[in-house]
Image (tube, rainbow, N blue to C red):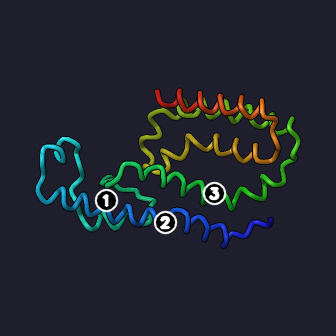
């Protein structure tokens, strides 16, 4: 089917924002109540002080501040950045040949880059705004997924790629 950007954006918004909005409200309320009378737990977890300004700045999902009220939201920022890149990548990726050998020739460098990029960038990523510092290491994995979408894989090869991806996630945790 043809790629229509307006439909794509609407579907992504409908998928993410309602649940995020409820969680944003709940987290704001919880942090507000917890910071009204600090306890040993709020102090030991280094919970940020609640301010309406910081809370409202987190509404658009991409947040560049430091007072994060829900630490899981970093993944939504990364997801949003990937969603924003898709309209720019659909046509070039669709133009790639659906030849398994060609796809394999693109996958090998992407897998190598996925493994090596975090080591190459190292501490330099700490200077970048949080959403981008989390986004950059996953770009090769995203690229590999886009390239893989061009071909139908044999089940054995697909399982092998899942093992490689799992190993990458495991190694990335250390």
Q: How crowded is mark 3: few (under 14 residues within 10 Å), some or many (20 or more)?
A: few
User: Nearest the camera: 2 or 66?
Assistant: 2
Q: How far apart are marks 2 and 3 (CA)?
A: 18 Å
Which residue in the structure is indicated by mark 2?
17
**Mark nearer the N terminus (3 vs 1):** 1
The structure residue drawn at horizontal position 72% and vertical position 48%, both measured from the top left corner, is 146
At 70% across and 32% down in the image, what residue appears?
A: 161
Q: Residue 27 carries which label?
A: 1
Task: Quadrant for residue 162, please give it.
Answer: top right
Foreground: disc 2 or disc 3: 2
Instruction: Please determine whether, in this image, residue 150 is positioned above or below residue 19.
Output: above
Q: Mark 1: which secondary structure?
A: helix
Q: Does residue 21 lie above or below 140 as drawn? A: below
Name which of mark 2 and mark 1 comes first in the sequence. Answer: 2
Q: In this view, does 151 lie to the left or right of 143?
A: right
Percent across and percent down for residue 11 are 61, 67
Q: Which of marks 3 and 1 is in front?
A: 1
**How far is mark 3 from mark 1, CA to CA?**
28 Å
Residue 85's tag is 3
The quadrant where residue 123 appears: top left
Tag 3, which secondary structure?
Answer: helix
Badge 2 element: helix
| Residue sitting at the far bottom | 6
């Amino acid at each position: 089917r043809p790629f229509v950007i307006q439909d794509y954006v609407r579907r992504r918004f409908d998928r993410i924002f309602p649940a995020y909005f409820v969680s944003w409200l709940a987290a704001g309320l919880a942090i507000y109540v917890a910071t009204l009378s600090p306890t040993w737990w709020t102090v030991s977890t280094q919970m940020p002080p609640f301010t309406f300004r910081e809370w409202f700045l987190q509404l658009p999902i991409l947040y560049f501040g430091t007072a994060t009220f829900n630490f899981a939201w970093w993944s939504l920022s990364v997801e949003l950045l990937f969603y924003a890149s898709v309209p720019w990548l659909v046509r070039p990726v669709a133009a790639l040949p659906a030849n398994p050998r060609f796809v394999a020739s693109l996958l090998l460098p992407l897998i190598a880059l996925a493994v090596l990029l975090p080591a190459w960038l190292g501490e330099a990523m700490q200077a970048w705004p949080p959403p981008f510092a989390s986004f950059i290491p996953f770009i090769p994995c995203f690229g590999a997924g886009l390239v893989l979408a061009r071909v139908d894989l044999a089940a054995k090869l697909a399982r092998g790629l899942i093992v490689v991806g799992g190993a990458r996630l495991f190694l990335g945790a250390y």
